[in-house]
Amino acid sequence: PSYFPARPYAQRNACIYNLKTIQKAKSQWATEHGKSATDIPSGSELFGEGRYIKYEPQCPRGGNYAIGQVGELPTCSHADLGHHLDG
């Protein structure tokens, strides 16, 4: 079927959306807690009930996310497939 070639693009776009959401959550966390650009939030500080993101985002292609420092963009292990933010 013709929808198979579109799947990688949809997965990439969904992953990029997740990365943007993680970046926004990191920024909010840093602002609210007086953190610097070198601080690194834990997943439990960003994800969960009553946190910045209700559920921990998952890469639709099965990649792993690295939150990283506040001053850095989060990354996906499938960056080579276009799953990355351009900074």
Image (spheres, helix red, strand yellow):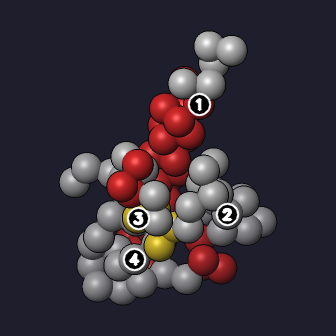
Q: Residues within 10 Å of mark 2 (few under 14, many from 20)?
A: some
Q: Earlier in the sequence, mark 2 or mark 3?
A: 2
Tell me the CA gap for discs 1 and 4.
28 Å
Query: Is residue 18 toward the left or the right of residue 72 in the image?
Result: right
Looking at the image, residue 59 lies above or below residue 50: above
Q: Please, what secondary structure does the residue beneath circle 4 have?
A: loop
Q: Residue at x 66, y 68 (%)?
A: 47
Does the image show residue 9? yes
Q: Residue at x 36, y 86 (%)?
A: 39
Residue type at tag 2: Glu
Q: Please, what secondary structure does the residue beneath circle 2 have?
A: loop
Of badges 3 and 4, the one in the foreground is 3
Q: Please, what secondary structure does the residue beneath circle 1 have?
A: helix
Residue type at tag 1: Arg
Residue type at tag 4: Gly
Q: Which residue is mark 1?
A: 7
Dots 1, 4 in contact, CB < 8 A: no
Query: Is residue 56 toward the left or the right of residue 6 in the image?
Result: right
User: How far across and how far down the image is residue 62, in percent?
Assistant: 63, 58
Q: Which residue is mark 2?
A: 56
Q: Which residue is mark 3?
A: 75
User: How far across and how far down the image is residue 87, in percent?
Assistant: 22, 54
Q: Earlier in the sequence, mark 1 or mark 4?
A: 1
Dots 3, 4 in contact, CB < 8 A: yes
Q: Residue at x 68, y 15 (%)?
A: 1
Image-quadrant location for residue 74: bottom left
Query: Is residue 2 toward the left or the right of residue 23 in the image?
Result: right
Q: Residues within 10 Å of mark 4 (few under 14, many from 20)?
A: some
